[in-house]
Amino acid sequence: MTKTSTREMSFRDSVDVMFEQAAAHLDISPGLKEKIRVCNSTYTVRFGVRLRDEVHTFVGYRAVHSEHTEPVKGGIRYAMAVNQDEVEALAALMTYKCALVEAPFGGSKGGLCINPADWDENELERITRRFTYELSKRDLIHPSQNVPAPDMGTGEREMAWMADEYHRLHRTDIDSRACVTGKPLSMGGIAGRVEATGRGVQYALQEFFRHPEDIKKADMDGTLDGKKIVVQGLGNVGYHAAKFLSEEDGAKIVTVVEWNGVMRNPKGLDIEALRQHITENGSMEGFPGGSFEKAGSTGLEDECDILIPAAIEASIHMGNVDKIKAKLIIEAANGPVTAEADKVLKKKGVFIIPDMYANAGGVTVSYFEWVKNLNHIRFGRMQRRQEEARNIMLINELEAGGMAFSDKFKADYSKGSDELALVRSGLDDTMRAAYQVIREALADKPELEDFRTAAYFASIRMIADNYRSIGL
């Protein structure tokens, strides 16, 4: 993918600039503003693991941005580009994101400088367990202090290893499973967690299209049905967002941008088939349902209604921002638009749904998983059958009075809510409520001008209120 210009500010600086733009509209002291902005602490660890008959040293990080409420929350990524500035910027975004969606967490983030493809599964497990040990020694993984989750390069497998290693180290901690989220269902995970961030992107877009004023600002009309969408990155987030939007909302995914090229189909790509092709072949090349071009990230510049950058930071920068044709950008990745490019897009009239809101589905469902682990009971277990019995009783009574219903309606209506249904309902409610918080901030202070600044404003205000309540 195209690299961002070296003249542009770093990802961390971009987050700070966006923070300052919003904080300038708040009536808080310079000291409190600085307390909210800075990262509280960052732990760097270098540990050795004997692999392939020699000792390999690995470098890892865990940044804690804000402890205005605990535990702190944030993913752990495995990538060679992981560095202190990156994890501190991501930790800050987590703080603001959690405040916006009212998840009771401070922000944290971690990473390990490693290319997972360089190691087999057994080796990765040994590395992950040792990293967990190093974090645990300093309470940087703990159900009530610091709760990691999956991120780039990690998933359910790594979270299972971490949870198991933590339990081995803390045998008497009855809440040990709550030390991480994003676990497999068999280890205390929650239904809907894998799809959560992509599902949250879908719910965010659905909420956008409920507001005619916002649709007009983006120079669009109608609904999601038939809208042309470009997706960058068909990993977990991009895949689920594209799948749900095309299969459930009628949108057309006309372009998918991946690391080695672009796949296009003006009539709409079959996302499930494309994902299966990538799984089997390691690349989009050769997929029969569209035309492939080895053209890096140029697909971002395709004509479309909606652009979903769901890959890496700084995908849209000063080198390509003038070529972006989308009317609406929804940031499924963290920091896909640089601060400089953001200014250009605003001048062009592009409507941006910012990352701190758009990709908050992951931490929202992680919150549900954490609560499930602490309660030691799955959602729906106590009320599902009671709901079914009540609904069946209502249908029977109405039919006895002469009304008639189809078998499908009766089956759908009488079904009680299971864990997945409750998780999706909770996520939908969270995304709708957070969207309203942003809109209300803009209504109260029109000078905020855009959704990103309004989202930062609302989050910082909530955090400031929290600090004030404890005497700062």
Image: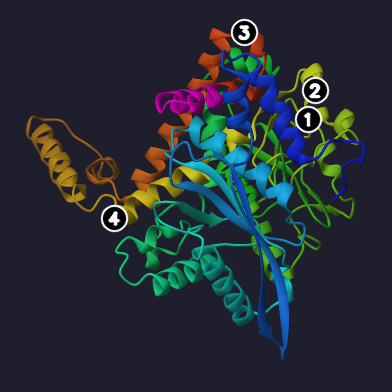
95 lies left or right of 354:
left
Q: Splitting the image into 4 quarters, where does residue 119 fall?
A: bottom right
The residue drawn where x is 10% and y is 40% is 393
Q: Looking at the picture, does residue 48 appear above or below residue 20?
A: below
Q: Is residue 221 shown to the viewer in this render?
A: no
How many C-alpha atoms fall within 10 Å of the one at disc 2: few (<14), some, or many (≥20)? few
Residues tagged 1 and 3 counted as in contact (Cβ below 8 A): no
Magenta-tinted stretch: 458-472
Queried whether the magenta region covers residue 188, the answer comes back as: no
The earlier-in-sequence mark between 1 and 4 is 1
The earlier-in-sequence mark between 4 and 3 is 4
| Residue at mark 4 | 378
Q: Main secondary structure of the magenta part?
A: helix
Q: Looking at the picture, does residue 408 appear above or below residue 121?
A: above
| Residue at mark 2 | 343
How many C-alpha atoms fall within 10 Å of the one at disc 4: few (<14), some, or many (≥20)? some
103 lies left or right of 209:
left
The earlier-in-sequence mark between 4 and 2 is 2
**Callout in the foreground (4, 2):** 2
Q: Amino acid at mark 1?
A: Ala
